[in-house]
Amino acid sequence: MKKTTIPQLLKKVSEGNKLTMLTAYDASFARIVDLSGIDMILVGDSLGMVMQGHENTIPVTLEDVLYHTQCVTRVVKRAHVTADMPFMSYQASKEEALKNAARLMKEAKAEAVKMEGGKELAETVFAMVQAGIPVMGHIGLRPQQILKLGGYKIQGKDFLSAEHLLAEAKVLEEAGCFAIVLEGVALETARQITQNLTIPTIGIASGPYCKGQVLVLQDLLGMNAEFRPRHTKIYADLSKIVSNAVHQYIQEVQAGQFPTEDHATHRNLQAVK
């Protein structure tokens, strides 16, 4: 089974196909997602909320992303793996960004990194690409700036903000990004950005006109019954399935129905005298 490469992804888009991307943070889910035929896996800093229980992505460290990316890349055989660069792992300086991105590739075997930002990241993106580090951009709603934004708000709803996002996207394309995530971007703005770029856009909460889509796997699987975002379609309600399984396990243990002799790992060949 051969690994999916960036040229293959771009060729797929050029032939009129949509790209598919999901998050994964551990070996168990990464293996399943990979075998299911997904194009790309994102080890997102959303792990802060999904795996660690934080309110947002800001507390996530580079060491956290390194660890979870290692868990994923150990088992993924085919899908392309991109790792998120967490808050303040790339903003301080171009040199620090290069060093941290290199760690994600060398130590965790990520095949690309993703950064949130626009024009302010142009030099950093260019330097990374020149050094051989593939970069996926991320504009629109930036979760790492949630405290500044004051909430998870749709971006690009008026003409000026739409023009600003388009300019940001073009700068990232010129700097060398191979793709750009559009998160929480108004539908028509996402369409305009997609139509004006030669690289693919990967949408989340940005409508159907992007060249690909990405979702948090646990959202798609309905694993948090208290969090059902509008932009996510629940393909399987695992929160209910898992809960029912655990309840059944509790009942059977308490009733003496599990384990039975059939579940024993071994049996004595003769009674002890």
Image (spheres, helix red, strand yellow):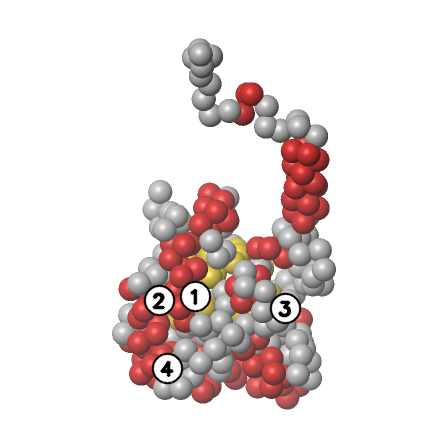
Q: Secondary structure at mark 1?
A: helix
Which residue position holds label 2?
104
What residue sits 54% from the left and 67% below the top? 48
Of mark 4 and mark 3, the one earlier in the sequence is: 4
Q: How many neighbours does mark 4 have within 10 angstroms: few (below 14), some (14-19), or many (20 or more)?
A: many
Q: Secondary structure at mark 4?
A: helix
The one nearer the camera, 79 or 59, is: 59
Q: Nearer the viewer, mark 4 or mark 2?
A: 2
Real-space Cα separation, disc 4 to disc 1, in angstroms: 20 Å
Which residue position holds label 4?
124
Real-space Cα separation, disc 4 to disc 2, in angstroms: 16 Å
Which residue position holds label 1?
65
Which quarter of the rendering shows the C terminus? Answer: top left
Of mark 3 and mark 2, the one earlier in the sequence is: 2
Q: How many neighbours does mark 1 have within 10 angstroms: few (below 14), some (14-19), or many (20 or more)?
A: many
Regarding residue 259, the answer to whether it shows in the image is: yes
Q: Secondary structure at mark 2?
A: helix
Which quarter of the rendering shows the N terminus? Answer: top left
Real-space Cα separation, disc 1 to disc 3, in angstroms: 25 Å
Q: Is residue 83 above or below residue 75?
A: below
Q: Nearer the viewer, mark 4 or mark 1?
A: 1
Regarding residue 8, the answer to whether it shows in the image is: no
Tag 1–tag 3 contact (CB < 8 Å): no
Tag 4–tag 2 contact (CB < 8 Å): no
Of mark 4 and mark 1, the one earlier in the sequence is: 1
Q: Nearer the viewer, mark 1 or mark 3?
A: 1
| Amino acid residing under circle 3 | Ser
Tag 3–tag 2 contact (CB < 8 Å): no
Of mark 4 and mark 2, the one earlier in the sequence is: 2
What residue sits 31% from the left and 76% below the top? 99
